[in-house]
Amino acid sequence: MKTVVIDAKTIAAQIKDEIANEVRLNTEKGMRPPHLAAILVGEDPASKTYVASKEKDSHSVGFTSSVYRYPETMSEKELLGVVDFLNNDPDVDGFIVQLPLPKHINENNVINAINPDKDVDGFHPVNVGKMVLGMPTFLPATPYGIQTLLERTGIETSGKHCVVIGRSNIVGTPMANMLSRNASNANCTVTLCHSRTQNLKELTLQADILVVAIGKRHFVTEDMVKEGAVVVDVGIHRVDDPTNPKGYYITGDVDFEHVAPKCSFITPVPGGVGIMTRVSLLMNTMTAYRRNMEKA
Ligand code: GUN
């Protein structure tokens, strides 16, 4: 099988160029740029890295970016106060509260407090409901990125059997929903597999498109994949490696080396879904901004 490694870097760069051009045209007309804000509570290293990337991405396309940083000891009430402030700041088009939050803060209370019109993560129940109903909304970043990647790579989804492994609220569940909808970039027959699924391999072997978001390194092996399948790897694992200048390397939920030769298309890790997830947040912020400019 001639395998195509999906070129997410080029696709993400194209989308960022499109966004940057739109922002430039608007600001040349005297409009303000889009504004994406983030709230970061505590010192979780991964969260700090994610928020720093969001800031960098925002600046790279001409957005205004602001980050509200608070100590681990912040109370839920104080955080809800910041959410309320951003909900009411007319210069902020969208914002995210970086997860996970410290244990003494109830994440659902915080997500529920976000104005759905500014919820560019697409986590608020109103936006999840709109997604399920196929109404225009902010789609969660990772499945939105994957759908965009498939579309821009020219991969036909209509009528295909898509098997999703993992049922998280932010990846597997929305992915299964989005790909089953009656839309030109969807129309799949979807099977959603999870920890209680029996005969997993029997199901994955039927997949024309296999989306793996299980969070286990090299969980998908070559014997689980049909010849010619499209494989999308959502996993990100850091593996210690003293021979690597960074001291580690990054790998995914799929045993790429052995699975790739069987695939028609496969996403690499790193350089695949992760890049698209970052771009999705920019696309959602543009959507919020366009709405605000139309209202103004
Ligand atoms: N933590 C891990 N992924 C995400 C995400 O997409 N959004 C937010 N807010 N927090 C996260």
Image: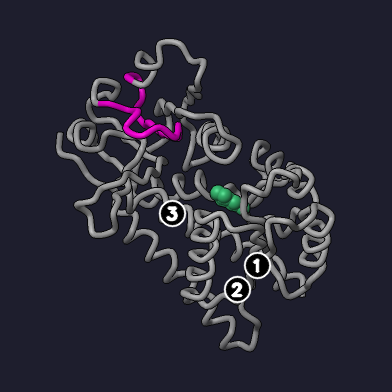
- Say the numbered circle drawn on residue 236: none
Q: Which of marks 3 and 2 is nearer the N terminus?
A: 2
The verdict on label 3 being within 8 Å of ligand 1 is no
Instruction: Tell me if residue 147 comes above or below residue 179 in the rendering.
Output: below
Instruction: Tell me if residue 240 comes above or below residue 90 in the rendering.
Output: above
Mark 1: give few (<14), some (14-19) or many (20+) Cα within 10 Å: many
User: Dot 2: what SS?
Assistant: strand
Q: Earlier in the sequence, mark 2 or mark 1?
A: 1
Residue under the image location 33 percent in, 35 percent down: 231
Residue under the image location 79 percent in, 54 percent down: 75
Q: Nearer the viewer, residue 36 or 288?
A: 36
Q: Nearer the viewer, residue 23 or 121?
A: 121
Residue beneath disc 3: 276
Mark 3: give few (<14), some (14-19) or many (20+) Cα within 10 Å: many
In the rendered image, which quarter is residue 296 located in? bottom right
Q: What stretch is highlighted in magenta?
A: 205-221
Q: Which of 252 and 14 is in front in this view?
A: 252
Cβ atoms at labels 3 and 2 below 8 Å apart? no
Residue under the image location 49 percent in, 29 percent down: 166
User: Dot 1: what SS?
Assistant: strand
